Amino acid sequence: MTDEHDLVETAKEYLKSHYGEDTVFMTVKDNKVANGTGTLSVDCTVSLNGHKSDWSKKFHFRSSEVVNMDARLR
C-alpha cells in the first residue's frame, strides 16, 4: 500500500485505536512510504474528550501498518 489516501486513513485509525483521538483534519507534509514501508509526516488537529489540539506527527509504516509514531504539539 502506497496510496496516500489509504496511508492517511490507516494513520487516523491508529490514532483512534491507540489514543482515542478523533481526527478533525490531517494535512500530509511529507510522504516517504514506498511498498508499505517508510514514514508519513503530517500536521493534524485531533479531538479527545471534546478538547482539540494541533500536532505534527510522523507515522512509521512497515508492511502497510503503523508500527510507531512520533508527535509534538504545534
Image (cartoon, rainbow, N blue to C red):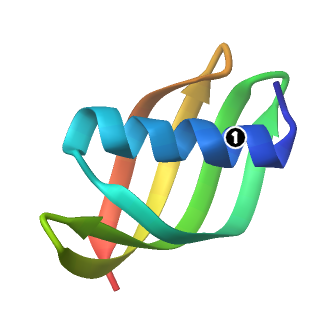
Quadrant the N terminus occupies: top right
Q: Position of residue 54 (x, y in %)?
A: 35, 81
Based on the displayed image, in which of its 4 quarters is residue 9 positioned?
top right
Residue flagged by tag 1: what amino acid is it?
A: Leu
Which residue carries the number 1 mark? 7
63 or 25, nearer to the observer:
25
| SS state under label 1 | helix
Q: Position of residue 59 (x, y in %)?
A: 51, 45
Q: Write the residue at 28% across / 69% down.
A: 47
Q: Where 20 sits versus 17, above or below? A: below
Q: Write the residue at 69% across / 66% down.
A: 28
Q: Is residue 42 left or right of residue 36?
A: left
Q: Position of residue 39 (x, y in %)?
A: 63, 44
Based on the displayed image, in which of its 4 quarters is residue 22 positioned?
bottom left
Q: Residue furthest front?
A: 50
Number of numbered discs? 1
Q: Is residue 34 left or right of residue 27?
A: right
Q: Where 47 sits versus 68, above or below? A: below
Mark 1, Cα crowd under 10 Å, few <14 / some 14-19 / many 20+, is: many
Quadrant the C terminus occupies: bottom left
Q: Write the residue at 17% across / 73% down.
A: 50
Q: Is residue 4 left or right of residue 61?
A: right
Q: Residue furthest bottom?
A: 74
